Image (spheres, grey):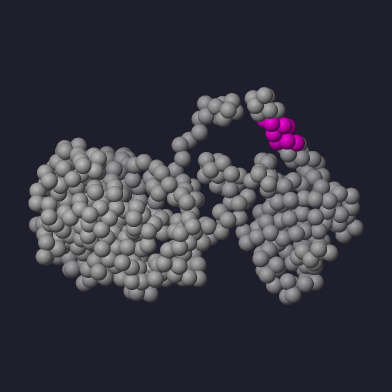
Amino acid sequence: MANTNEVNNNENLNELLKIRRNKLDELRSLGIEPYGIDKFERTNMTSDIKNDYEKFEGKTVTIAGRIMSKRGHGKASFADIQDRDGRIQLYFKMDVLGEKNYEIFKILDIGDIIGVTGEVFKSKTGEVTIRVQDFKLLSKSLQILPDKWHGLKDPDLRYRQRYVDLIINPTVKETFIKRTAIIKAIREFLDSRGFIEVETPILHTIAGGAAARPFITHHNALDIDMYLRIALELHLKRLIVGGLEKVYEMGRVFRNEGMDIRHNPEFTLLELYEAYTDYHGMMDITENLFAYVAEKVNGSKKIVYQGTEIDLTPPWRRLTMIDAIKEFLDIDFDKVSSDEEAIEIAKRHHLEVKEGMKKGDVIALVFDELCESHLIQPTFIIDYPVEISPLAKRKHDNPALTSRFEAFIYGREIANAFSELNDPIDQKERFIEQLKQREAGNDEAHMMDDDFINALEVGMPPTGGLGIGIDRLIMFMTDAYSIRDVILFPTMKPKTDQDETKDENE
């Protein structure tokens, strides 16, 4: 029975699509070219009129948008039109429009885009309305929009057809308008503090700046393989060497890795670098940036994410990685003296230990797997093991650790920062250690970058550096469950004909 209903629904849909195409011919026979208008001048947006009715009452306005509903019959009808800012009711009357124009209106479908001119008034029910004096068809819709009751709820279809999602779901549109406001606020914050926004290459000859698997492409003219960037770091630090002192870039990076609610293969990353400061300076920037953005776009330094109130007000808690493990697991790695002893601790907690792991690797593993989920309120986890921090400066009082932090909210890492390593000899030794890991099969280990070593040999001042995943930040500011809800066109596996057939048979 389910298959029979599905077939009937598809036949009905195909029939409705044919009717829409037939209407194209009908409109053209009436002298209306459905795609013939190149430009339409509007005087206002719907929100202007609805938010300031007293100003517009009795005035003539011209607006444009998509028909979202039609109702009525006989010699008068109502419709709702939607533009970027909202909806407004339209009133069409044969006596005003004339019989021919009214018949043309009756041919129009939900989804068609029109421009209208008319007088603003309130209906008997108090609804702000435009009494249409003239209208033009700007674009005929040949597809059928989901109805307002059932909407577009299939997440897969929403992400594939974001254009329909934006039309049907107002909250989706609000999320992406807010995304733009968030990015603008970030720029305001950094620009006001003397940072210079720069652009660096997306195509790299060496995949560096992060532990990640890159996408590989080929440059035909140079006949070399190149990598889509996995981070912004190494080019920005070259600019610090060059004397720009305070720089940032906000741009797409690409990592050839898995996808889940927090990961998309291409995502927006903010990286900034400031000369003559350290990772403490980066903590100050991080907590103040988050607080500034929240207040700017949401009106408060407190946000609610998935039902949990989170207070972004500085200062945030600071906790070393070793102390965090001690607090949440009652394990003290300060008392662990060997790699073997650390590995035994990991095994006792049923964690997967890879060949070649050292004490620092195990500390990071234990923290990642068993402690992160406890960090709900904003927290800086500081002083990371040197084994997992190839670009960070060692701590003077404990060379096994680095001046590095990651910031966590709701159990998720949202920022990563260092006192940047500026010792070229130490940096080269760490690259060599990373190369050994690559040879052992770790394709996320860092490549050797001789030009970057050369830049450090020219001399880089003491520098603090910070990276923030912008999409994750936006998730928190918009209460979005998945990263796909804040990326307009998230990465999706293309649908095949077999997929379509499978959907129809289910």
Foreground residue among 224 and 272: 272
**In which quadrant of the rendered image does the C terminus lie?**
top right
Q: Is residue 122 above or below residue 103?
A: below
Q: Is residue 16 above or below residue 153?
A: above
Report whether 298 appears left or right of 210.
right
Report whether 36 appears left or right of 403.
right
Q: Give residue 343's quadrant in the image.
A: top left
Report whether 333 appears left or right of 502.
left
Q: Residue at x 70, y 67 (%)?
A: 50
Q: Bounds of the magenta span?
A: 9-19
Q: Is residue 190 above or below residue 34?
A: below
> Residue 256, percent across and down?
34, 42
Q: Residue at x 29, y 43 (%)?
A: 213
Q: Give residue 76's quadrant in the image.
A: bottom right
Q: Main secondary structure of the magenta part?
A: helix
Q: Is residue 17 magenta?
A: yes
> Residue 93, percent across and down?
86, 57
> Residue 411, percent across and down?
36, 55
